[in-house]
Image: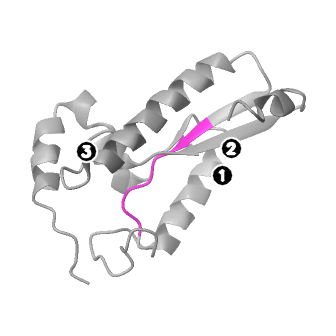
Amino acid sequence: MYAFTPNLLKQPSATIVNVSSALAFVPLPATPTYSATKAAVHSFTQSLRVQLADSPVEVIELAPPGVRTTLLGQENDEHAMPLEAFLDEIFKLLDISPTPQELVVERAKPLRFAEANGSHGEVLKMLAGYKPPAE
């Protein structure tokens, strides 16, 4: 990140998009390392946004829910969001606000706001019962 930031600072405008996960906010107990690294991306993105606040560089965090892709073997997971639906919602959010601080689709909001609304423990218990589909 810091290797190319000087080049971005020379531009009239630039955007950095970091991809975290809804699991940055409430971890999936079955994947603690994944959840922890996504929480680190969230923290890093917040810090980077503050560092670059007085520059032409926007910093956006994309925090998707589980999405049906082959990346993590979720292409057949009925609990994961269909990729096309995810992309459609992201593009609608960008139409509303081209440079938001965060991009969080409706399906990810229960995790994103669990701490703030007091449902963190309940959501964590629900995630603890999640079993990925058998291959």
Q: Give the range drawn in magenta.
A: 60-67
In this view of the protein, which residue sits in the foreground, 48 or 53? 48
Our reading of the magenta stretch's main secondary structure is: loop
- For image coordinates 24% across by 37% down, the residue present is 114
Asked whether the viewer can see residue 114, the reply is yes
- For image coordinates 42% across by 34% down, the residue present is 40
Indicate the amino acid at tag 1: Asp
Number of disc labels: 3
Q: How dense is the environment of label 2, judged by Cα within 10 Å: few (below 14), some, or many (20 and up)?
A: few
Quarter holding residue 113: top left
Q: How dense is the environment of label 1, judged by Cα within 10 Å: few (below 14), some, or many (20 and up)?
A: few
Q: Is residue 54 left or right of residue 23?
A: right
Give how far apart the Cα atoms at labels 1 and 3 are: 30 Å
Disc assigned to residue 72: none
The quarter in which the N terminus is drawn is: top right
Give whichever of discs 3 and 2 has the lower sequence position: 3
Q: Is residue 8 above or below residue 22?
A: above
Indicate the amino acid at tag 2: Pro
- For image coordinates 41% across by 43% down, the residue present is 38
Give whichever of discs 1 and 3 has the lower sequence position: 3
**Residue 116 place in picture, x, y as percent:** 26, 28
**Residue 66 place in picture, x, y as percent:** 36, 62
- Residue that badge 1 annotates: 95
- Colour mode of the rendering: one colour
Q: In this view, does 12 lie above or below 67?
A: above
Disc assigned to residue 98: 2
Q: Do the CB atoms of the residues marked 2 and 1 lie less than 8 Å apart?
A: yes
The quarter in which the C terminus is drawn is: bottom left
- Residue that badge 3 annotates: 27
**Residue 82 place in picture, x, y as percent:** 42, 73
Secondary element at tag 2? loop
